[in-house]
Image (cartoon, grey):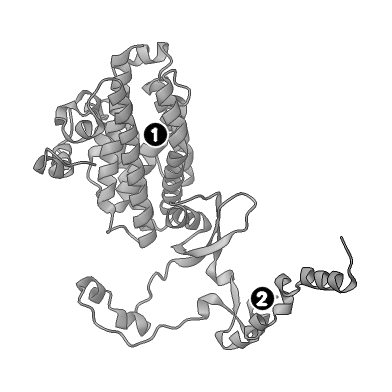
Amino acid sequence: MNTLALKDLLFKMADDALIIGHRNSEWTGIGPMLEEDLAFSSMSQDKIGHAQALYNLLHDLGEADADTLAFKREEKNFKCCQFVELPIGEYDFSIVRQFLFDTAELIRYDMLTQSSYQPLSLLAKKVKGEIKYHVMHGDTFVKQLGKGTEESHARMQSALNYAWPYALGIFEKSEYETSLLSENIFIGEEELKKRWLEKISLVLESANLIIPSIDDAKVVYGGRKGFHSEFLSPLLDEMCEVTRSDEATAEW
Amino acid sequence: MGASGINKSFRKISGSFSIKTNIMSSLDPRVNRLDLKKIADGEIQTNSHLITWEVFHQEKRGKQVEHCGIVHASTPEMALILAKEQYARRGKTTNLWVAKTSDVYTFGTEDEDIFETTPEKTFREPAFYKVRDRIEKFQNKNKVNV
């Protein structure tokens, strides 16, 4: 088995989950209404849990433990896409991001239930239900707000336009695509993107929202190779503050 | 028959409560910013765009659903999505139901006396009949060996 390819896949998935989980937790206490504050916070916790489980798989493959991987790595070693780094913005953007990102997550985990790497396929089977709810949440909000008032529709469309080039960056190819495919570890970013477009098109259509058309050149790549937006560094500073202040004993 | 045809002593639970106008000021500035006096006087309508939904929780398939609380939402879909994390994020759950609060009917609180003597009617409880005791008493009296 190509361990480098497998580790690259696990790192990008874990880092995506950790960073989006931390980002979305910024809504805790200031969500638009009590019920949604709680739901969004709870989903953020799920994401941190997914990150921890994936870091544990990496630990089993010889990497450092989950705490070290999460809190003691340099920014350039993170493999998350830039989409998850962006600030929470207004609620329209956070909902659009949740919808776009989690739909990709659900399809990715669904594909991974068939992975030849058994620890990963078992994990995928275990957490697929959680992510299914995240997608139900995203779908419901996008439809509700897309078809809501003139203002809610305009806000959702402009959030989608802003998010789009970053969202496509989720599917940045790695140098290991052929290896992952030939070893039946993962079917690959291209196929994932194709299925994702089919799925989100249906929801966006019923929400009266239009998928922006942009040049490939405008898609924001780089995250998977360690090139990040200006927003990741301050996020890591905040997230790692406790660990850095007490290197010896701080734990998750 | 619509709601208007229902006996006056029955009512919707959504109409059972009124907000008292005696508002205290709070040490928490966030509470004071809510301007509760204006809400109580009806000048501000809170969540006027959202209705409430009663949420029912089912632990296992086949088991009865139990009322567990409410959520604010605009549609049944939104109510279910929000109810999931409010009432099913801990412990075991197999399903949730939601129903509009305005679709739930109740007796008036002044009619609570219709239930008053129920706890005294122990003859309606299975434990009231100590059949075994009586059989034994009969057997002893007639010297019957079982």
Pick the residue in front: A7 or A24: A7
Please give the residue where the numbered disc 2 appears in the rendered image: B2
- Relative to residue A147, is residue A64 drawn left or right? left
- Chain under label 2? B
Q: Amino acid at mark 2?
A: Gly
Q: Nearer the viewer, mark 1 or mark 2?
A: 1
Please give the residue where the numbered disc 1 appears in the rendered image: A105
- Secondary structure beneath disc 1? helix
Q: Which residue occupies the extreme front position in the image?
A: B143
- Secondary structure beneath disc 2? loop
- Relative to residue A111, is residue B2 drawn left or right? right
Residue at (31% x, 57% y) in the render: A31
**Where residue A54 sits in the image (x, y, percent)?**
33, 30
Q: Which quarter shows the C terminus of chain A?
A: top left
Pick the residue in front: A51 or B140: B140
Q: Amino acid at mark 1?
A: Glu
Task: Give the class, few, some or many, for how many residues have Cα within 10 Å of label 1's Cα (few <14, many ≥20).
Answer: many
Q: Is residue A30 above or below residue A236?
A: below
Residue at (30% x, 83% y) in the render: B37
Residue at (39% x, 59% y) in the render: A35
